[in-house]
Image (spheres, helix red, strand yellow):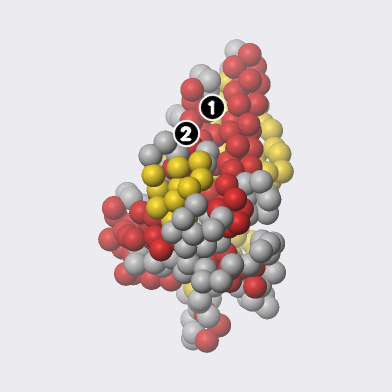
């Protein structure tokens, strides 16, 4: 008999919650495999982990060729694609700025001439290899969490789970016959949430900034200063078939606004923008 099974673990710097509907003999091993896949992504792409692929790249000199995990290779390929498609609004080489702000650990040694774009820093090769063209500090926090949600969903489906929800700190994807009501917190009043959409077989992700924060601590938004605007943007939510794109595109929409419409359409995505004054608007 199919019953509800729900588990939560601290991974990816947040609480990952997986809720499935399946017989116990299917659900339990499926949940274990889904969390294992998320742990794989964390180990490979966390800038906080000295043994991760990103920290190995950060230590490598120009000209070095490294072999990375299949997950890292896949996400780096998507990051290069989004960097080019967004005219660098999505900037994985923002890690140096985040290190300076104390949000990421400082690798040792600190090389001169750090790459300021992913395309300048690395070249992807066959056989899961990466050539370091210039020293590169890469932060994939703007999309790796969404990618982890996607691989967890794939692991659950492959194990025979017909439907459920994977939620990694608000980056989520639902699959199967049961629709999900998405509720968004009002960034002006974090204790208040409202239902904004009902989704099925879809992902969504949100980047938000609250009134009263001393600084914007969102990765990939390090060049933005929204506090000088008359009606500053408070949150962006993107709905897309894959969570990796929903996650990444929130940063692009935040910086490009309506200029990101073509990129959203290319990924079958839609955005909801919430400003300090007024109701949420769709893009």
Q: Compare marks 1 and 2 and give the one earlier in the sequence.
A: 1
- Pinpoint residue 151: horizontal percent, then vertical percent: 51, 35
Q: What secondary structure is found at the residue carrying circle 1?
A: helix
Which of the 4 quarters of the picture holds residue 185? bottom right
Residue 268 in the image: x percent, y percent?
32, 49
* Residue at mark 2: 175
Tally of numbered tags: 2
Frontmost residue, 39 versus 99: 99
What residue appears at the point 59 percent right and 67 percent down from the top-left corner? 111
Name the one closer to the observer, 198 or 97.
97
**What residue lies at 48% left-to-right and 48% top-to-bottom?**
65
Distance CA(mark 1)–CA(mark 2): 10 Å
The answer to whether residue 51 is left or right of residue 238 is right
Using the image, tell me which numbered label, if any, was put on residue 214: none
Q: Which residue is mark 1?
A: 156
Tell me the quadrant of the picture where the C terminus can be found: bottom left
Are the two marked residues, 1 and 2, in contact with CB atoms closer than 8 angstroms?
yes
Viewer-nearest residue: 146 or 43: 43
Q: Nearer the viewer, residue 214 or 164?
A: 214
Horizontal side of residue 87 vs 1, given as left or right:
left
Residue at (66% x, 21% y) in the render? 28
Can I make out residue 1 in this image?
Answer: yes
At label 1, counting other C-alpha atoms closer than 10 Å, the crowd grade (few under 14, some 14-19, many 20 or more) is many
Q: Position of residue 64 (x, y in %)?
A: 50, 52
Q: Quadrant of the N terminus?
A: top right
Q: Nearer the viewer, mark 1 or mark 2?
A: 1
Could you tell me residue 74's position as x and y percent?
Answer: 44, 42
């Amino acid at each position: 008999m199919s019953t509800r099974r729900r588990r939560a673990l601290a991974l990816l710097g947040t609480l990952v919650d997986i809720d499935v509907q399946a017989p116990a003999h299917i659900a339990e091993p499926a949940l274990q495999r889904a969390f294992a896949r998320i742990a794989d992504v964390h180990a490979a792409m966390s800038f906080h982990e000295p043994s991760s692929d990103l920290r190995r790249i950060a230590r490598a000199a120009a000209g070095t060729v490294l072999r990375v995990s299949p997950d890292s290779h896949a996400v780096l390929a998507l990051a290069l694609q989004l960097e080019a498609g967004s005219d660098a609004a999505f900037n994985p080489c923002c890690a140096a700025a985040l290190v300076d702000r104390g949000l990421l650990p400082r690798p040792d040694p600190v090389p001169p001439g750090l790459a300021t774009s992913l395309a300048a820093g690395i070249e992807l090769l066959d056989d899961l290899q990466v050539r370091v063209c210039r020293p590169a500090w890469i932060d994939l926090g703007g999309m790796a969490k969404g990618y982890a949600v996607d691989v967890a969903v794939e692991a659950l489906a492959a194990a025979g789970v017909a439907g459920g929800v994977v939620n990694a700190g608000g980056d989520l994807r639902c699959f199967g016959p049961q629709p999900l009501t998405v509720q968004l917190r009002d960034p002006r009043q974090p204790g208040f949430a409202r239902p904004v959409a009902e989704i099925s077989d879809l992902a969504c992700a949100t980047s938000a900034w609250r009134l009263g924060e001393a600084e914007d601590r969102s990765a990939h938004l390090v060049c933005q200063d929204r506090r000088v605007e008359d009606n500053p943007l408070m949150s962006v939510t993107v709905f897309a078939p894959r969570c990796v794109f929903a996650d990444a595109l929130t940063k692009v929409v935040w910086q490009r606004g309506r200029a990101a419409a073509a990129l959203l359409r290319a990924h079958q995505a839609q955005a909801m923008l919430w400003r300090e004054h007024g109701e949420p608007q769709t893009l």
